[in-house]
Amino acid sequence: MATIDPPSTTTVKNGGAAPSIRQPYVLRETLAGHKHAISSVKFSSHGSLLASAYNILHVWSTTNLSLLSELSSHNEGISDVSSTDDRYLFSASNDRTIRIWGLTIVTPLKTLTGHTNYAFC
């Protein structure tokens, strides 16, 4: 697992005062693959996978930052993603469905229907 460097400190002038504001986040990598704005990004519970979504669900390895799979089955944009472990991924969509994905196959294991409005995880 990657180590995180201590936060850097930036000085910002504010009406003559110069409070020190901590900047704890540093851009490490950019994962490119989506063609539209991303609506949701979540780590798996064990941290070995990262899922990002808009119309297509991308599953990334956090070990080498490679794209493992592109999952597409929803009829509208994906509003949220979730994971219980490194075996299953859930995607909720504006098409009012939730899909359960097994991460070893590229088709949903099950589609949950019946929502009367947009679905979220």
Image (cartoon, grey):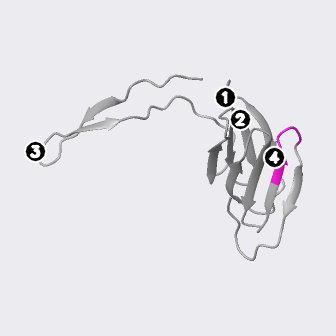
Q: Dots 2 and 1: beta carbons under 8 Å? A: yes
The spot of residue 13 in percent (x, y) is 18, 42
Q: Which mark is residue 106?
A: none
Q: Compare marks 4 and 2 and give the one earlier in the sequence.
A: 2
Q: Residue at x 71, y 74 (%)?
A: 117
Residue nearest the viewer, comparing 65 with 100: 100
Q: Dots 1 and 3: beta carbons under 8 Å? A: no
Q: Residue at x 82, y 73 (%)?
A: 114
Q: What residue would you read off at disc 2?
A: 60
Q: Is residue 38 visible?
A: no
Disc 4 residue crowd, few under 14, some 14–19, many 20+, Cα 10 Å: some
Disc 2 residue crowd, few under 14, some 14–19, many 20+, Cα 10 Å: many
Amino acid of disc 4: Leu
Q: What residue would you read off at disc 3?
A: 16
Q: Compare marks 1 and 3 and give the one earlier in the sequence.
A: 3
- Label 4 – label 2 distance at C-alpha: 11 Å
Asked whether 101 falls inside the magenta stretch, the response is yes
* Element class at badge 4: strand
- Label 4 – label 3 distance at C-alpha: 53 Å
Q: Compare marks 2 and 1 and give the one earlier in the sequence.
A: 2
